[in-house]
Image (tube, rainbow, N blue to C red):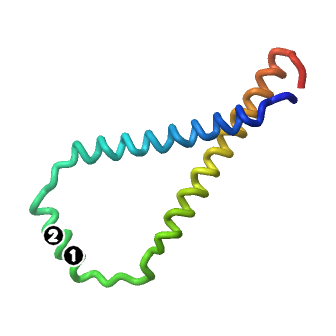
């Protein structure tokens, strides 16, 4: 099987970047279309003032490493999809395997 690893990794990175761009674009769209409701927001703030939170504050390194592992995982998934698709296409066309 002569599938270029560089092509598979490149496709995986593009796949991960596309997912990130879709998330950013949808966040921008939702922010643009957001219309606040003052009455409902006041009730939410009143509820939050009486709510007791349990747990621990988030660590910034967890966010950074979590994002990096997510990106690497999605890139690996994209590389596997590319490699599997290339292999299946070659087998389907009868050019080897």
Residue occupied by mark 1: 47
Residue at point 16%, 49% (across, down): 35
Would residue 50 be found to the left or right of residue 71 on screen? left
Q: Position of residue 58 (x, y in %)?
A: 45, 74
Asked if residue 66 is positioned above or below residue 28 in the image, the reply reads below
Question: Do the CB atoms of the residues marked 2 and 1 lie less than 8 Å apart?
Answer: yes
* Quadrant of the snapshot with the N terminus: top right
Q: CA distance from mark 2 to mark 1?
A: 6 Å
In the current view of this chain or complex, which residue is farthest to the right?
96
**Helix, strand or loop for disc 2:** helix
Residue 68, percent from left and from top:
57, 56
Would you say 74 lies left or right of 29 here? right
Check disc 2 and report the residue beneath it.
Answer: 43
Specify whether 21 is left or right of 45. Answer: right
* Residue 30 as seen in the image, left or right of residue 4: left
For mark 2, does the 10 Å Cα neighbourhood hold few (<14), some (14 to 19), or many (20 or more) residues? few
Q: Look at the picture and state if 96 lies above or below 50.
A: above
In the picture, which quadrant includes the C terminus? top right
Q: Residue at x 75, y 33 (%)?
A: 83
Taking depth in this image into account, of 79 and 40 the one nearest to the observer is: 79
In the displayed structure, would residue 74 be above or below residue 44?
Answer: above
Residue 13 in the image, given as x and y percentages of width and height = 60, 40
Quadrant assignment, res 56: bottom left
Label 1 Cα neighbours within 10 Å, binned few <14 / some 14-19 / many ≥20: few
Counting from the top left corner in percent of width and height, residue 22 is at 44, 39
Query: What is the quadrant of residue 55 in the picture?
Result: bottom left
Residue drawn where x is 64% and y is 51% of the image: 73
Q: What is the secondary structure assignment of the residue under circle 1?
A: helix
């Amino acid at each position: 099987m002569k599938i270029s690893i560089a092509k598979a990794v490149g496709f995986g990175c593009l796949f991960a970047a596309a997912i990130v761009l879709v998330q950013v674009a949808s966040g921008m769209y939702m922010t643009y279309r957001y219309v606040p409701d003052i009455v409902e927001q006041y009730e939410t703030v009143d509820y939050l003032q009486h709510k007791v939170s349990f747990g621990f504050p988030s660590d910034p390194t967890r966010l950074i490493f979590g994002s990096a592992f997510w990106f690497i995982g999605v890139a690996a998934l994209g590389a596997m999809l590319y490699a599997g698709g290339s292999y299946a296409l070659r087998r389907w066309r009868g050019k080897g395997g």
